[in-house]
Image (tube, rainbow, N blue to C red):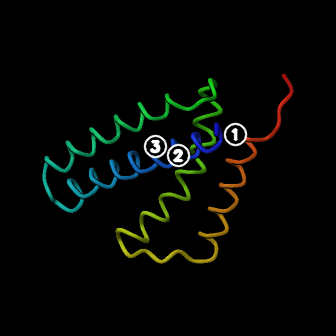
Amino acid sequence: MTVARSLLLFVLAALAEIGGAWLVWQGVREHRGWVWVGAGVVALGLYGFVATLQPDANFGRILAAYGGVFVAGSLVWGMVVDGFRPDRWDVAGALVCLVGVGLIMYAPRSG
């Protein structure tokens, strides 16, 4: 159950961080206004909170592993929200990152 909870928290963190960054991008780069930017800032703050709920107590490990989730999640966000079409190298890179997530977070450790 701990792995499932951890994975769910990574997905929620990715939605908050990537969504927040996208909202800021829309507000600034697409000239949608400060309401979009403000919503993005709130979402980015939620990302920081969600990351603290991970069952592992090691900040560095959580953030390092989350980096891989962020990479893959950003490509998925781009596909779903912006119509981005990743090439095979994007997909290969994201898979490498997700393997890294598995190794960093869920590999058996002594002690």
Label 1 neighbour load within 10 Å: few <14, some 14-19, many 20+ = some
Q: Position of residue 12 (x, y in %)?
A: 45, 46
Q: Nearer the viewer, residue 35 or 109?
A: 109
Residue that label 3 marks: 13
Q: Earlier in the sequence, mark 1 or mark 2?
A: 2
Label 2 neighbour load within 10 Å: few <14, some 14-19, many 20+ = few
Q: Residue at x 64, y 40 (%)?
A: 1
Location of residue 55 with respect to 21 vertically, above or below? above
Q: Quadrant of residue 106?
A: top right
- In three-dimensional space, the C-alpha distance between marks 1 and 3, rounded to whole angstroms, equals 15 Å
Q: Is residue 58 left or right of residue 38?
A: right
- Give the quadrant of the C terminus: top right
Label 3 neighbour load within 10 Å: few <14, some 14-19, many 20+ = many
Q: Secondary structure at mark 3?
A: helix
- In three-dimensional space, the C-alpha distance between marks 3 and 2, rounded to whole angstroms, equals 9 Å
Q: Residue at x 71, y 49 (%)?
A: 100
Location of residue 22 with respect to 48 vertically, above or below? below
Residue that label 2 marks: 8
Q: Position of residue 101 (x, y in %)?
A: 67, 47
Residue that label 1 marks: 105
Q: Is residue 99 left or right of residue 37?
A: right
Cβ atoms at labels 1 and 3 below 8 Å apart: no
Q: Position of residue 79 (x, y in %)?
A: 43, 71
